[in-house]
Image (tube, coloured by chain):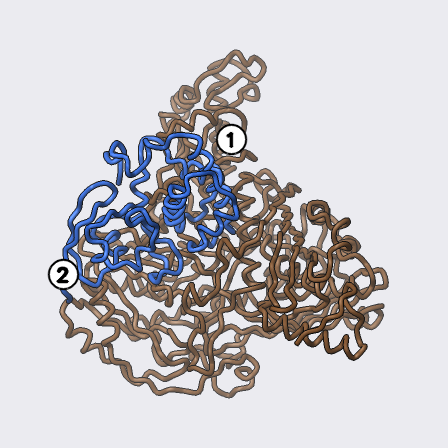
Chain colours: A brown, B blue
Amino acid sequence: MADFGKRGDGRDEARTVGGQVGRRQPKVDAVDRMRGVTRYTDDLVLPGMLHGRLTRSPHAHATIVAIDPAPALALAGVHAVITGADLPRPYGIIPWTPDENALAVTKVCHVGDAVAAVAAVDEDTAIAAAAAIAVTYQPLPALYDPAAALASAVTINPHSKTGNRSKHVALAFGDVDGALAGSALVVEDDYHFEGTTHGAIEPHCALAAVDGQGVLTVWSATQVAHYLHRELARVLDWPAHRLRVIQPPVGGAFGGKSEPFDLEFCAALLAVRTGRPVKFLYTREEVFLAHRGRHPMAMHYRTGFDADGRITGVDARTLIDGGAYSSFGLVTTYYSGQLLGAPYHLPAFRFDSTRVTTNKPACGPKRGHGSVQPRFAIESQLDEAAIRLGVDPIELRRRNLMDADTRTINELAIGSYGFRECLDRVEAASGWRTRRAALPHGRGLGVAGSTYISGTNYCIYPTELPQAAVQITLDRSGRARIFTGANDIGQGSSTMVAVIAAEELGLELADIRVIAADSDLCPVDLGAYSSRVTLMVGNACLAAARELRGKVAGAVAARWQVPPARVGLIGREAIDVADPSRRAPLTEAFHWAEASHGLLTAAGSYDTPRDRHGDYRGGTIGASPAYSFTAHVAEVEVDVELGEVRVIAVWAAHDCGKALSPRIVEGQIEGSVYMGLAEALMEEHVVDGAHGGVVAAPSLLDYRMPTALDTPPIHALIVEHPDAQGPYGAKEAGEGPLHPIIPAIASAIRDAVGVRLTRTPFAPPRLLAALRARAAREAAGELAPHKGRRLELG
Amino acid sequence: MSETRRCRLRLDGVEVEVAAPAHWTLLEVLRYRLDRIGTKQGCDKGDCGACTVQLDGRAVPSCLVLAAQADGKTVTTVESLRGPALHPLFAAFDDAVAAQCGFCTPGIIMAADAWLRRIGRPVTRDEAAAALAGNLCRCTGYTKILDAVVEASGRRAGAATAATDPRDPSAEAAGG
C-alpha cells in the first residue's frame, strides 16, 4: 500500500479549481516510485528472512527418476528443501484446466521447469544448494513443432486428458461458404505470428511469512492477488481465512504476472516449514523461462469481398503453439476467433482454432491477449483487398463500418463505437490523403484498425458475486481513504479511483489515500487483466463515492436549509450553487455529515451485465460490457539493400470512451504502440530445438527490446465516444491500442516497396528474401516495378 | 561462504564503510547493506539500466561494478535527489506522467542527471534518446520520458539548481 498524501513540494495548492475527470493531472503514486521510496516486493526485507531458489530442469522433456536433496541439506545455512511430492495438487488459472504443479512431480515438460526449491540463509547459499540437489532424469523425445506434437502419440503434459490437443474451438456464424463463393474477390493467405514475451523490468518476486496467530502472508509481484489467494489456499490446503495476500506496487506486468507461479507456492510452503520468512526473486533468465507470453500462431485466412470492398465473409484456421501448460489457453483459443467480430461488419464468419501442447515454456496472456495475432492476419487481408480492388485502404475500412448499439454476428454487444472517428483522426493527422501517393519508392504509409474488450462479463470461475467492489471512508481531516482490491501494475488504477472519488467529493488527488490489493484490508477485486479495471473498479468506486457525496451534500443542505441539489462539492469546498457566496470548507462539511450519519463510509459494487453475450457454447468468451476501438497509421522507410525497416512515425487514435486521466491514456496508447512495434520488427521468444529446447534469447540483450533510439515518435490521439456501461463513459485504454501497429507496419512496407510480409518479426533476412523474390518476378516480367522503381538486388 | 571485504564509499555525500562478500557487486551492497532500495535490479547483467547510479559522477550500471571497485569512490544514488523541493527531473517526469510502473525510472533519472550535468545546456529529443539508450523502459514507449528530460534540461538551464545538487553540501542533510 502506498500513502499518496501531501508531497511537501507546495504544488498541491495550485490544483484546486475545476473537476478532476478529464484533467491532465499527474499520477498519485508516481513521485514515490521515481524517487525510489516505493517498496516493490523485492524491496521488502523481514527479520530472519531466508532466501529461496529453484532447481530447474535442463531437459525439455524427461521423466524424473529420483531427487536427492541430501547434498543440498549438507551445506551450512540450508534450512529446507521441497520437491513436487510436497505440493502434489495441480493448479491452473482456468479452473477447468488444472494441469501444472508448483514443482514437477513425475516429469518435466520444458527446459526450466522447476523440480525442487531450497531455503537458505543467504542468496549465495541458496544458489549453491539449488545446484547441489541431485536430480536423476530419464530424457524423453521432445516435441517443439505444434503440428508434430498434435500428430504424436506421446502426451507431453501428464495431466492432459486430450493428448497434446490443449483446446479446440470451431464456431461458425452465417453461411461462410456461400458468401465466399459469391464474392467478387477472395483474399487467401497464410500468416505466422511469432511468440513474444512481456519483459517487465521488475522480475517476479514473492515473500512469505507466518505470524504468531498462524496467518500466512504472501507478498507477490502479481497482477491477480485474488486468484493467487484462491490457488495458494487450494494447493497448500491452507484455510483461506488464515491466508493474506498482499500485492505491493508492481514494476510492470503486461499479462506476465497474471497467474500463480512456482515461486509463490514455494515461498509459502518453505515459510511454513522453516518458521521464517522466505523470499524468492527470479533471475532475468527465469523470467524468460516462466514466460506466459504471446502464443505463436499459424493462421490460414480467407476473406471475401464484394466489388466495392465490403466484406462478405471470413474463414480462419489457426494452429496455436501453447507450450507445456494450459495457462489461459482455453480463453486464448476462443479469443483467436471471437474478437474478429468487430470493428467491421461481418455478414458471415467462422473460425477453427487448435491450441497444442509442446515442450516449451507455456504461453499465456500478453497485452491484447489472443487477438493481436488474428488482427495481423485480417488487417493484412483488408489491405490486400484494397490494393486489388483499387480502393484506398482507409476508404475500404469505412465501407465496412458497424453502427453503435448493435450486435455483431457472433453476438458481441457493441455499445459506443468511435471507430469511424479513429480512422478520420489518423487519416488527417498523418496527412494520408496528400502524402501517401507522393511518397517515393522505399517510403510508405499503412493503416489498420482493431477492437478490444473492457473486461469480460464472466469471472474466470463461476460465481454470482460482484466482479469489483470499493470501500471509501472519509476522515475528519477532510481526506478520503479508498480500499480497493485493484492491483496497480503501473497502468494507473490507483490514480483512476482517486480521480473518481475526488471528482464526486470535491477533493484534490492529494487528499486521497488509496489502500490497494491487500486481502486483509480490501474488498475482493479479480485483478488487472482483460482491461477490466477502469470500467469495473471505476464503476464500483463511483457508486461508493456517490453515496458519500449524497450524505455530505445532504448534511450541508440541512445546515443551510436548502434542497440537496443546490449543494455542490468542488475544490475542497461545499458551495450553494444558487448562491455561490455561501460556502463552507469541505472538512467542515464532512464533520456535519459525520455528526448526522456516524462514520462516513460507503461500499460500492459492480457486476457485469449477464445478458450481453451469444447464446451458444463459448458465447460468453469475448463478451464484454464495452468495446474500445483503435486505428493506426504507420509511416516507414525501407532500406532495400539492408532489408531494414525504419518506422518514421506512428499516429494512433483510440476510442477509450472517456479519458478520466488523459495523460495516463496517452501513456497507455504510446506504450501499447511501442510494445506492438517491437513485436513487428524486433522481438521473438523462441525455443531452440536444435540445442535441447533452450530459450534462444534469455536475456534483455539477446531478446531485442527497443531502446529509446529504436522507438519512433508516437502521436497518441484520444477519441471519446462515451459508453453507457463505463464510469463517465470510460472504456479500456491499456491493450486495444497495441493491436493495429503490426499490420499497419506490414501494410506500410507493402506500400513502400511492394512486398507483403506475412511472418513476424519483419527482420532484415525475411524482408530481403521477399524483396529478392519480387525482384526475380519483376525481372521475369510477372510484376511491374513498384512506384516506378525496378528492384535490382544482388 | 566467501571472503569478506570492507570498502569505503562516499555515498550520497556521507562517508560510509561497509563489509560484504568480496564478489558482491555495488548493486548488492547498495540494496542489501546500505538500504538504497531506489537502485533496482532488473537483469543483473548490465542490459536494462534499472540499477544505474553515478560513480564519481559518471552513470554506471551498478550490477557491473564490483563493490571493491567502488572502494574510495563517490557513489550517488537516486536517494540523493530527495530534498525539501522536488528535484527538477522528478517534477518534469511527474508533470509529463513519464513514470508508469516506475521500476526503471530511478535508473533513468540517474543516467539523465549525470548526462544533463555534464552537457549543461538544454537538449533535444534525439540527443536524449541517444543518451538514454542504455536504459530500458517497458511501459512508456519512451515518449514522455524524452519529453520530461528535454523539459528538465530547460528548467535546469533556466534556474540555479544548487539547492538540489547532490554535490552541494547543503543538500546532504536531506540526502538519502
The residue drawn where x is 59% and y is 42% is A730
Residue A138 falls in which quadrant of the image? bottom left
Question: In the rendered view, would you say B175 is above or below A615?
Answer: above
Mark pair 2, 1: CA separation: 58 Å
Q: Residue A553 location, x and y as percent?
A: 50, 23
> Does the image show residue A522?
no
- Dot 2 falls on which chain? B
Residue A641 falls in which quadrant of the image? bottom right
Q: Quadrant of the N terminus of chain A?
A: top left
Q: Quadrant of the C terminus of chain A?
A: bottom right
Q: Nearer the viewer, residue B146 or A721?
A: B146
- Dot 1 falls on which chain? A
Q: Nearer the viewer, residue A19 or A646?
A: A646
Disc 1: which residue = A504
**What amino acid is labelled 2 in the image?**
Thr
Disc 2: which residue = B4
Q: Residue A571 location, x and y as percent?
A: 49, 24
The residue drawn where x is 51% and y is 37% is A543
Q: Are marks 2 and 1 on the same chain?
A: no
